[in-house]
Amino acid sequence: MKQSQKKKTDWSQFLSGVPARDYIFQDIPYEKQMEQASALIKESDIILIGAGAGASAAAGLTYSGERFTSNFSEFIEKYGSVYMTDMYAAGFYPFPTQEAKWGYWSKHSMINRFLPPALPLYRQLYEIVKEKEYFVLTTNVDHQFQKAGFQTERIFATQGDYGNIQCEKGCHPKIYDAEDLFRQMDQARHDCLVPSEMVPKCPVCGGNMTMHLRCDQYFVEDENWHGAAGRYCDFLKKMEQKKGVLLELGVGFNTPTIIRFPFEKMVRENRNLSLIRLNMDEAVVPESFGNRAVGIGGDMAKVISDLNHRNCI
């Protein structure tokens, strides 16, 4: 049977829109929390990492402030600071031409995907889990897990990748590596525009191309995407009979249905699982989980560094 004919995993089965009803901020000293989290990791047989935007922000890939203004000054000047407030908002600007759209997105991809090395937070996270059976579920699109050494076969990036492009209307289930194109655009860009001859066109329908980011119904879930979804499903089945930890990093309440709420559901339904939730401002955990949950707020980079130190000694 050909790969393309295999039954695809139903991604919706992993989602949950039900929040806990007993959230609390734990009134526990930091050192005690670290001791508990470290023990859960050491005693675990299997670890599922769930990473949201807060993880990359804590690692240094911030989308606002000086990092935005210093790298995108020409765009702010051209389009106005009212619209160009940060990299996230800038991505929704109604660029008047394809040359303008790719002028921005090629820069965005270079700054957030191709130029940054593996950042310390991700490298230290890999050190914590590399000897364990692990899997990564992430909504981030910056490729930091792969750069840090995590195996591609153990990563499910549900929302796309800044390094790929697709047909704007999703006319066919294929994505395209755009690294060389973006590097060329970055060199050729002038007045925030790329040359017309560099504007990509769909090789099938001849229409416009767009970033491979989940923002509408045309997001392409290609063969590799479905393969990763299937491996995630297999990993969850393995977890059912093992002592496991769900390590959640920087997942807030903007899009909680992919990681935050499903992780809570898994811990609620399986006494062998525990939750470690790291979040700058929203480290609340269900009180009913008792000692099976640790919610640590504040500087995630410091927490990961401290956990790495504790688990390496």
Image (cartoon, grey):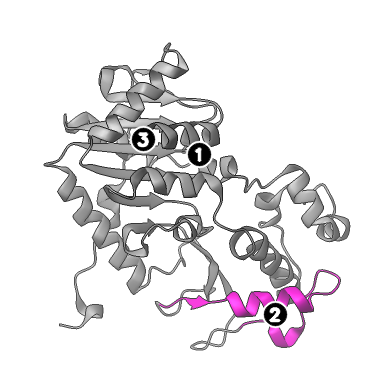
Residue 58's image quarter? Answer: top right
From the viewer's perspective, tell me whether residue 92 is left or right of residue 214: right
**The magenta stretch spans residue 165:** no
Q: Report how far apart the C-alphas of labels 3 and 1 lie in the structure.
A: 31 Å
SS for callout 1: loop
Asked if residue 244 can be seen in this view, the reply is yes
Asked if residue 252 can be seen in this view, the reply is no
Of the image marks 3 and 1, the number of the one nearer the N terminus = 1
Given the image, on which type of amino acid does mark 1 rest? Answer: Asn
Given the image, on which type of amino acid does mark 2 rest? Answer: Gln
In the rendering, at what x and y percent does residue 40 appear? 28, 30
Residue at the spot 71% in from the left edge and 55% down from the top edge: 90
Q: Residue 311's mark? A: 3
Of the image marks 3 and 2, the number of the one nearer the N terminus = 2
**Residue position marked by numbered label 1 in the rendering:** 254
In the rendering, at what x and y percent does residue 31 appear? 44, 18
Q: Residues at badges 1 and 2 in contact (C-beta under 8 Å)? A: no
Q: Residue 194's mark? A: none
Which segment did they paint magenta?
A: 174-200
**The magenta stretch spans residue 189:** yes
Q: Which quadrant is home to the N terminus?
A: bottom left
Q: Residues at badges 3 and 1 in contact (C-beta under 8 Å)? A: no
Given the image, on which type of amino acid does mark 3 rest? Answer: Asn
Q: Report how far apart the C-alphas of labels 1 and 2 lie in the structure.
A: 35 Å
SS for callout 3: helix
Of the image marks 1 and 2, the number of the one nearer the N terminus = 2
Of 131 and 231, nearer the camera is 131
**Residue position marked by numbered label 2 in the rendering:** 184
Q: Which quadrant is home to the C terminus?
A: top left
